[in-house]
Amino acid sequence: MELAALLVNELAVDQVRGRRADPPADRRAALEAAFQRQGWTPSHALTSADADRLVDVAAALHLAFAGDVGALNQALVRHAAVPNLHGDPPVLAFHHPGADLVDAWAADAGTALAMVIGVGQGVRLRSCEADGCELVFFDVTRNASRRFCGLSCQNRAKATAYRARRRT
Ligand SMILES: [Zn+2]
């Protein structure tokens, strides 16, 4: 789930917290910086070619966050998602043991979104509601009521609403 949101937020959104987000000049570096912020160490080193191929994956995952089940199904087929036990002791993953990194990430991240949608929790796949922000997140609040990606957007939205009230 975190991987899906990270890929979308790094590679597929045009606006972030009220600012235009130009596509990163070096996608590989942008992804590695994002992994570091999350405290993750990917199991395989990412190449620039991988990072470029992940742009299409991120676009499909972004559509899934917007409720486009067809785009998600296509991505699951394209990247050969299949439940599979890896290693010893066996660990459940959703890609073939021989899948390359892009297929593996697409299959695992896509399956995570599919499982959320498939148990009727698609409402928890959200995009920030603040103006000028398209960041996605997984809403873990009890009643699925989170509206913003973070405090800065929440505060911006509050200020906008306050100004709108003062004008009327
Ligand atoms: Zn936001």
Image: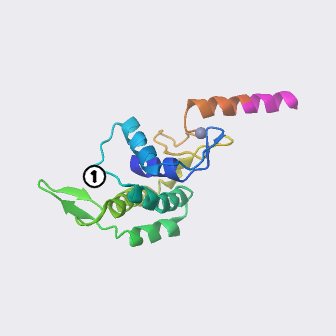
Q: Give me the residue at 32% from left, 61% from top.
A: 104
Q: Position of residue 10 (x, y in %)?
A: 49, 47
Q: Give me the residue at 87% from left, 30% from top.
A: 167
Where is mark 1, residue-wise? 44
Is residue 6 magenta-colored?
no
Q: Residues within 10 Å of mark 1 (few under 14, many from 20)?
A: few
Q: Is residue 115 visible?
A: no
Tell me the quarter of the image containing the C terminus. top right
Is residue 167 magenta-colored?
yes
Vertical placement of residue 113 versus 155, above or below = below
Q: Position of residue 146 (x, y in %)?
A: 55, 39
Magenta segment = 160-168
Which residue is more in the foreground, 52 or 86? Answer: 52
Look at the image and name its color scheme. Answer: rainbow
Q: Is residue 26 visible?
A: yes
Q: Position of residue 62 (x, y in %)?
A: 53, 56
Which residue is more in the foreground, 73 or 8? Answer: 8
In what element is the residue under mark 1? loop
Q: Give me the residue at 40% from left, 60% from top.
A: 49
